[in-house]
């Protein structure tokens, strides 16, 4: 499966549960220095006060189906938009996603 097709499937799977979610690819796949077996680092930002198990399961289950079908590993982080833009603004992860991430 081609990169563009996989990213489109990830985007559609996330939007199926939350059409307002922001989705970013970051890490080696975004930079283009990945290896054949590198995972796909995905950040999902949602308009929620906190991330509950129900919210996590909703996204992870859909992405897991893609993993099973494609054999690709999708590593996902899920944060509330407010927390991401305020509490994590000075974190290395925030800087990495801001500078190298690709919004889907």
Image (spheres, helix red, strand yellow):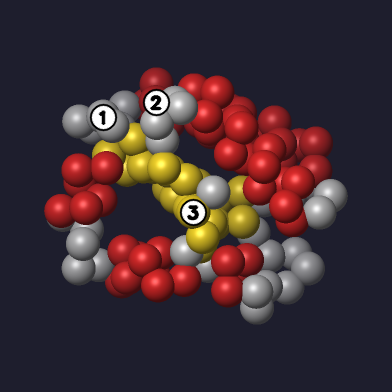
Q: Are marks 1 and 2 in contact (CB under 8 Å)?
A: yes
Q: CA distance from mark 1 to mark 2?
A: 9 Å
Give the mark nearest the N terminus, 3 or 2: 2
Q: Residues within 10 Å of mark 2 (few under 14, many from 20)?
A: some
As drawn, the label of residue 55 is 2
Q: CA distance from mark 3 to mark 1?
A: 19 Å
Where in the figure is residue 39, as x and y percent of width and height?
64, 59
Q: Residue 8 versus residue 37: which sits nearer the camera?
A: 8
Q: SS class of the residue under badge 3?
A: strand
| Residue under the image location 80 percent in, 43 percent down | 70
Residue found farthest to the left: 86
Where in the figure is residue 64, as x and y percent of width and height?
64, 35
**4 w.r.t. 38: above or below:** above
Residue that mark 1 sits on: 48
Give the mark nearest the N terminus, 1 or 2: 1
Residue that mark 3 sits on: 103
Where in the figure is residue 56, as x and y percent of width and height?
42, 31
Residue 103 appears in view:
yes
| Residue under the image location 72 percent in, 52 percent down | 4
| Residue under the image location 76 percent in, 37 percent down | 68
Q: CA distance from mark 3 to mark 2?
A: 21 Å
| Residue under the image location 26 percent in, 29 percent down | 48
Give the mark nearest the N terminus, 3 or 1: 1
Q: Residues within 10 Å of mark 1 (few under 14, many from 20)?
A: some
């Amino acid at each position: 499966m081609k990169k563009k097709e996989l990213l489109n499937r990830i985007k559609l799977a996330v939007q199926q549960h939350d059409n307002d979610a922001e989705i970013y690819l970051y890490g080696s796949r975004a930079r283009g220095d990945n290896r054949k077996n590198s995972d796909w680092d995905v950040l999902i930002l949602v308009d929620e006060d906190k991330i509950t198990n129900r919210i996590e399961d909703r996204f992870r289950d859909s992405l897991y189906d893609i993993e099973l079908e494609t054999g690709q590993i999708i590593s996902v982080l899920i944060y509330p938009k407010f927390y991401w833009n305020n509490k994590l603004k000075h974190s290395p992860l925030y800087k990495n996603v801001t500078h190298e991430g690709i919004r889907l």
